[in-house]
Image (cartoon, helix red, strand yellow):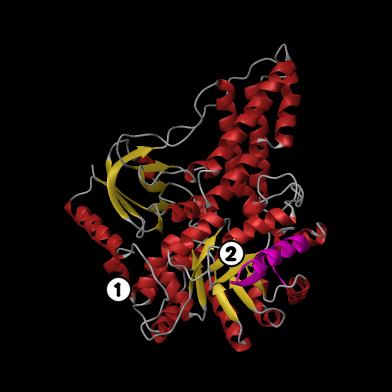
Amino acid sequence: MRAEYSGIGVVPGRVIAPAWIMPPPVAAPQKQPAPQDPEAEAERIREASAAVHAQLRERAETVTGDARDVLKATALMAKDPTLIKTAIKRLTSTDAETAIWEVAAETAAQLEKLGGYMAERAADVLDVRARIVAQLRGVPAPGIPHADAPFVLIATDLAPADTATLDPESVVALVCAEGGPQSHTAVLARSLGIPAVVAATGVLDVTDEADVFVDGAGGTIRTAPGAAEAELVTAWQDTVGRLQTYSGPCLLKDGSRIPLRANVGDGTQAREAAAAGAEGVGLLRTEFCFLDRDTEPSVAEQTRAYAEVFAAFDDHKVVVRTLDAGADKPLPFLTDTDEPNPALGVRGFRTSRKAVGVLERQLEAIAAAARQSSIDVHVMAPMIATAEEAAQFAGLVAAAGLPVAGVMVEVPSAALQAGPILDQVEFASIGTNDLTQYVMASDRMLGGLAELSDPWQPAVLQLIRMTAAQGISAEKSVGVCGEAAADPALAVVLVGLGVSSLSMAPRALPAVAEVLRSVTLEQAQRIAEAARTATSAAGAKAAAREQLPVLEDLGL
């Protein structure tokens, strides 16, 4: 019987393939009495923890960028000393499997109560729990099913460890019943270029091996596809051929130039971005130097890592974001994991108040790497909320011998006070993921709040417009480096709102450029105004798409 399901499209693409449902999770253990040899059982827990940590670390080395960062962070959880020590203490009353199971469940429940970023990590803790228990049982870890032919993967949601290692040759589309457009699943699917839909209620009713049609742009899933769906797939394949490559610069229809840069997380991804035609880097996530470490990396280590990124570009701009630790990226030597609400706590630039010297040493390393290159290095701080903080950061940048300081606009106060903040620095870059989350007070991981965790929300668009207007008035550049820039329709709106540059996953460059080239600046401004004055995210998106027929032509 034919059925149709609707969700939120997060990665464009149209495919028809058999569906496979993510297998059930590892079953809860049957509680057993305390072991006769608690120390031997404790050693089993330590060995299982170490094995899972090593497996996730090994996976991390096979991927790059966002995927590597997520896997390294998940690997840290597998050897979390509090988790392991607390489980070992329970061996006086129960067995190893039950001890790990119960302690991890309590930890996840605590994280969910905190909300925001920490609630996002609860699923990661449960994923690690399942892997440790599977290791104790001597059975395969939970994971993505294997099939002899390409398939559509359907799941409630995916753990980052699974999403990060999806093989696009096997999994040709991803559909999740839960999750939101800014979740880790969505972000990693974009980086892999796998057509994806999230928040697709009811989709778990689809049976294994049933043929399904997935439209990753429209957010539609249909069973028993027919000739009409086959034609849509054929049209998309033609589009893919047109959108294989990008070569800058990106010019609007009237000749206005909009630099398109890339978001990268290490040297390998920087080289891939350069090969994809990116006009430099709009966001270098420096966390890749710090994750999966118990101690701060040395200045020499950081210098080598940043120099590798800079070497990928000859004469383009590279914008470096200083360490964005805290919330979903806790570091044992820098952040406090006992904060009652880490999403609103000491993260980003705020960590410099507590860990004196870490930011200064990072800036020293960036400056040393910049001296080895001829590129234009800009440095920006995350989580800036006031003009005073912006001035403090600008002073540290100048003291390090770096010429250009900027800030991330991620909290409403920074958008509202962009003018005074830009008086202290040379540029701003809007991080739409966090800005959306803070403006709408919605956890981006919750499928039930997906309509709120959407950068198309008119309130978010209004703050972006305000920020860009203050940048124009101050004659300072204001770019966007959040996931929103990878949406071709939203890219047009952002340009129309006054944003001067866009940075995105390298895979998104061709489609964004193709759509931008179809409009003049005046048209983009008119489309942006229609979106901004809508009364809902869905209305804003519909208003913009109605004036962009090229999207339908391209299947975007």
Q: Amino acid at mark 1?
A: Pro
Return the residue nearer the eye: 19 or 30.
19
Q: Secondary structure at mark 1?
A: helix
Q: Is residue 251 visible?
A: yes
Q: Residues within 10 Å of mark 1 (few under 14, many from 20)?
A: few
Q: Position of residue 204 (x, y in %)?
A: 39, 41
**Span highlighted in magenta in the image:** 359-386
Return the residue nearer the eye: 429 or 249.
249
Residue at 53 percent across and 49 percent down: it is 67
Q: Is residue 380 above or below residue 345?
A: below
Q: Is residue 197 above or below residue 84?
A: below
Image-quadrant location for residue 486: bottom left
Q: Position of residue 419 (x, y in %)?
A: 66, 82
Residue 374 inside the magenta-drawn segment: yes
Q: Is residue 468 above or below residue 371?
A: below
Residue 549: give its label.
Answer: 1
Q: Position of residue 32 (x, y in %)?
A: 64, 16
Please identify the residue farthest to the top as the structure is shown. Answer: 36
Does 143 sit left or right of 38 as displayed? Answer: left
Q: Earlier in the sequence, mark 2 or mark 1?
A: 2
**Quarter containing the C terminus:** bottom left
Q: Amino acid at mark 2?
A: Phe
Residue under label 2, please give it. Answer: 310
Q: Is residue 127 visible?
A: no
